[in-house]
Image (tube, rainbow, N blue to C red):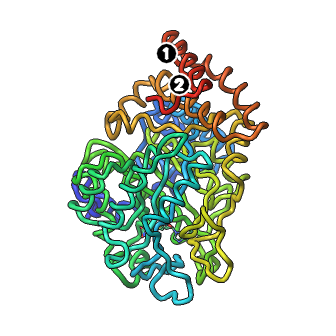
Amino acid sequence: MYNPKSSKAEEFIAHEEVLASLEYGEKNKSNVEEIDRILNKAREKKGITHREAMVLLDCDIEEKNQEIYALAKEIKEEFYGNRIVMFAPLYLSNYCINGCEYCPYHARNKHIARKKLSQEEIVKEVTALQDMGHKRLALEAGEDPVNNPIEYILECIQTIYGIKHKNGAIRRVNVNIAATTVENYRKLKEAGIGTYILFQETYHKENYEKLHPTGPKHDYAYHTEAMDRAMDGGIDDVGLGVLFGLNNYRYDFAGIIMHAEHLEAAKGVGPHTISVPRLRRADDIDPDVFDNGISDDLFAKIVACIRIAVPYTGMIVSTRESAETRKKVLQLGISQISGGSRTSVGGYVEEEPEEENSAQFDVSDRRTLDEVVCWLMEMGFVPSFCTACYREGRTGDRFMKLLKSRQIVNCCHPNALMTLKEYLEDYASPKTKEIGEALIQKELNVITNPKVKEKTAEYIANIHNGQRDFR
Ligand code: SAM
């Protein structure tokens, strides 16, 4: 039963309420009056309900769709400016006891090379990532209590934060591992993780159970309530996501907006990020068997409608998407992207021989980090390697307050420019450096507080003279 006051995610994201919102979207998709009402509410930039978001997603009036895209762009610019946060995934282990039908790590896959990084290998992988310029990682691992217990993950985090690099440390480790207990979330919090990321894959319980026929991930309620437990364990920042392509996109769109509403209602703070992965070809998996694929245009519409529905939530797109698709969605709401990614275990130190194939899925955007950084700047974006919020305790509702106060321009923008300057000094190719230096000079003028502007210019000069790791 749908109970909007329920503190349990599974009761909040109830099947009948998802169906009711699908019906509401279908009924109102050409209803100009209702679409205008929703757009006017959305223009207040405080979000809209899942039912209202569904109407915008379903809207079939071209002129209104253009208004939706324009509003998504406006919200993106107002809350996140032109900064794009950069990160890289790091695959720790592909041992897995689950049976996910779409993932090559599934336990039935006997020909995939199973690998788990040792602590020495982690130092090498992370050093390779730092040599590229990365400061923020997302750890990825299969679920296997024997090969990858929580102690292993904690040890990896400790190793990573302890690595000394001439250009500064890894500053934020986000973690994408299987649903676990409050006690384990508490341990992850104590280990100093940034965001805990877990994709729901699909909110459709029956299909979820079919897609996860075996292993601990089969338990829909345990998976769906993972973020509640993570927050109970003290983790402020959680990242939601659904894997588009597995299930009807409208159902999962309503589900993810409801999940965000649930966290806001039950925990007082919504998700820190929403990821929008799309299913990719992978070893032992043929995405063509899943007949829920979505077109690039539809994908862009989903991003725009999420942006409007939850304006305070960061949005992530990975290298599963091509440069062309990434370009489109960057304008509409995406605030974080990965660059130079490898999805194989140990892939940053050594490109994997074809026969081993430990990769999770095929990467579409195969450009180097430098190429991605240069490309972003050519489009007028400021690539940011910033993690200052996390280091200064601005997580959860404290981060949301900063975002809502619109003071981000005097806080995030200086930090983004300083970390970009570090990147340009330490890693950039001559072309990237030239474009970046000009961009920094231009973007200093965006800072409205004169004192902050002056201080930022001073720090940037100090970085040029060799200082690193400003807070
Ligand atoms: N093992 C953890 C779990 O089950 O949640 C998290 C790590 S898993 C490496 C990260 C995500 O990759 C999954 O949640 C899934 O959404 C995504 N994924 C799996 N197979 C994929 C595929 N073929 N194409 C694109 N993404 C995929």
Q: Residue at (40%, 24%) from the top-left corner?
A: 405
Quarter location, residue 18: bottom left
Query: In which quadrant of the rendered image does the N terminus lie?
Result: bottom left
235 or 132: which is nearer to us? Answer: 132
- Circles 2 and 1, Cβ within 8 Å, touching? The answer is yes
Q: How many numbered markers are drawn?
A: 2
Dot 1: element: helix
175 or 45: which is nearer to us? Answer: 175
Give residue 337's position: percent from left, percent from top. Answer: 58, 49
42 or 216: which is nearer to us? Answer: 216
Q: Residue at (56%, 21%) from the top-left corner?
A: 462
Above/below status of 468 relative to 118: above
Query: In which quadrant of the rendered image does the C terminus lie?
Result: top left
Please give left or right for residue 230 compared with residue 348 in the image: left
Please give left or right for residue 432 compared with residue 299 in the image: right
Above/below status of 39 relative to 337: above
Quarter location, residue 144: bottom left
Q: Residue at (27%, 56%) from the top-left corner?
A: 228
The crowd level at tag 1 (other Cα within 10 Å; few <14, some 14-19, many 20+) is some
Dot 2: element: helix
Q: Residue at (63%, 67%) from the top-left corner?
A: 350
298 or 100: which is nearer to us? Answer: 100
Give residue 421's position: percent from left, percent from top. Answer: 61, 30
Whether residue 58 is visible: no
Question: Which badge, 2 or 1, comes first in the chain's sequence?
Answer: 2
The residue at which mark 2 appears reads as 414
The residue at which mark 1 appears reads as 452
Give residue 237's position: percent from left, percent from top. Answer: 35, 47
Q: Is mark 1 within 8 Å of ligand 1?
A: no
